[in-house]
Image (cartoon, rainbow, N blue to C red):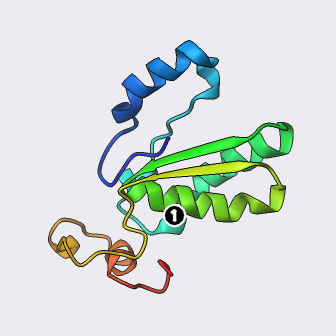
């Protein structure tokens, strides 16, 4: 479960609580995204990808990625990079700016230039 820009994994606490009643709690994971996601997509995703890679190498179970807002972009990036494992991966995107956005002037709120470029509408990394 991947949080949005400048957010925290605790946004998922109630969801984790609910899922823990149906599944083992240690199977539900909400990592802190480096720099709260205020960095390039690759920088934000790579530490999580390393952990997912370890999981997929040692488990023969499906993986569900849930991302909200910027976390949705990261989830799709992780899915793309994990396809080589031939595991079943389901990605759920909640309000992800997958083609970038024209609605919010990110330059006023964020300092990372790479992130600003990636979130610009129709940026190459979005496509």
> From the viewer's perspective, is residue 103 above or below residue 14?
below
Residue shown at the point (32%, 80%) measured from the top left = 120
Could you tell me how many numbered marks the image carries? 1
Point out residue 2 in the picture as x, y percentages from the top left corner.
46, 46
Residue farthest to the top, as pictured: 21
Point out residue 13 in the picture as x, y percentages from the top left corner.
39, 25
Whether residue 56 is visible to the viewer of this picture, yes or no, is yes
Instruction: Say which quarter of the image contains residue 82.
Output: bottom right
Q: Residues within 10 Å of mark 1 (few under 14, many from 20)?
A: some
Instruction: Say which quarter of the image contains residue 80.
Output: bottom right
> Which element type, helix, strand or loop, lies under badge 1?
helix
Left or right, 90 with reference to 31: right
Q: Nearer the viewer, residue 100 or 26?
A: 100
Point out residue 69 in the picture as x, y percentages from the top left corner.
36, 56
Q: Nearer the viewer, residue 77 or 35?
A: 77
Point out residue 47 in the picture as x, y percentages from the top left corner.
59, 52
Whether residue 44 is visible to the viewer of this picture, yes or no, is no
Residue shown at the point (35%, 56%) measured from the top left = 95
- Per the image, the residue denoted by label 1 is 43
> From the viewer's perspective, is residue 37 above or below residue 62?
below
Residue shown at the point (50%, 40%) measured from the top left = 1
Residue shown at the point (40%, 32%) measured from the top left = 12
Instruction: Say which quarter of the image contains residue 42.
Output: bottom right
> From the viewer's perspective, is residue 104 above or below residue 17?
below
Left or right, 54 with reference to 116: right
């Amino acid at each position: 479960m991947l949080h949005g820009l400048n957010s925290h994994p605790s946004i998922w606490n109630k969801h984790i609580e609910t899922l823990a009643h149906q599944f083992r709690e240690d199977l539900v994971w909400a990592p802190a995204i480096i720099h709260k996601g205020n960095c390039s997509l690759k920088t934000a995703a790579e530490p999580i990808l390393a952990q997912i890679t370890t999981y997929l190498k040692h488990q023969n179970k499906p993986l569900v990625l849930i991302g909200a807002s910027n976390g949705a972009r990261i989830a799709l990036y992780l899915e793309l990079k994990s396809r080589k494992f031939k595991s079943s991966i389901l990605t759920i995107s909640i309000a992800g700016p997958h083609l970038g956005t024209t609605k919010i002037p990110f330059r006023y709120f964020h300092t990372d230039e790479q992130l600003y470029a990636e979130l610009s509408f129709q940026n190459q990394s979005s496509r």
